[in-house]
Image (cartoon, rainbow, N blue to C red):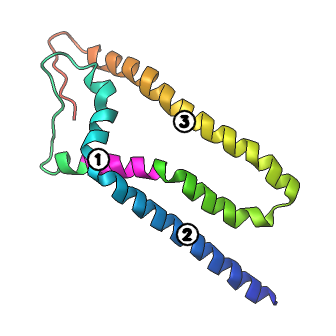
Amino acid sequence: MSVTETFVVHLLELRSRLLRIVIGLVVSILAFLPFSNELYTWLAQPLLSQMPVGTHMIATAVTTPFLVPMKVSTLVAIVASLPYTLYQIWAFVGPGLHIHERKMALPFVVSGTIFFFLGAAFAYYLVLPVGFKFFVEFGAPQDMPMIT
């Protein structure tokens, strides 16, 4: 095989992997879209729990109640499809690595995944409630927060 043929084979493999990533992302988005309102409510809970009694979030545009839950479900779908995306990247890059390089990468991938989810849980359950409470209570007592 010539250098040009090898390069074309690599480009075709890359195209195949990128197409699989896009298809996985689309499938993930379609799976999460029916639950967009529930996801939005769940993710907004740390903020809603810190708001003063009798207040609520507001929409500043006509399309906001429709688009914001859709954006939230799309972001959740991106995070949910990340393992598949990372696998496709690894399947493209992995064959080009030596065996000892592949063995070194595995602990980083596993620990990185675990620390990512631990960090997300830490932010959701500990940091966000404290931060939202501070920002909601920061103004003068007569100020009523109107959060979009």
Question: Who is closer to the viewer here, 140 or 132?
Answer: 132
Q: Are marks 2 and 1 in contact (CB under 8 Å)?
A: no
Residue at point 25%, 15% (across, down): 139
Checking the image for residue 18, the label placed there is 2
Q: Tag 1: residue type? A: Phe
Q: CA distance from mark 3 to mark 2?
A: 25 Å
Residue 105 x %, y %: 76, 49
Mark 3 or mark 1: which comes first in sequence?
1
Q: Are marks 3 and 1 in contact (CB under 8 Å)?
A: no
Q: Is residue 47 above or below residue 95?
A: above
Residue 118 x %, y %: 56, 30
Checking the image for residue 35, the label placed there is 1
Question: Who is closer to the viewer here, 11 or 145?
Answer: 11
Residue 52 x %, y %: 20, 16
Q: Can you identify the residue that label 3 sits on?
A: 117
Residue 10, image quadrant: bottom right
Q: Is residue 147 above or below residue 100?
A: above
On whether residue 38 falls in the magenta region, the answer is no
Q: Which residues are magenta?
A: 68-78
Mark 3 or mark 2: which comes first in sequence?
2
Q: Secondary structure at mark 1?
A: helix
Structural crowding at the residue carrying mark 2, measured as other residues with C-alpha within 10 Å and reported as few (<14), some (14–19) or many (≥20): some
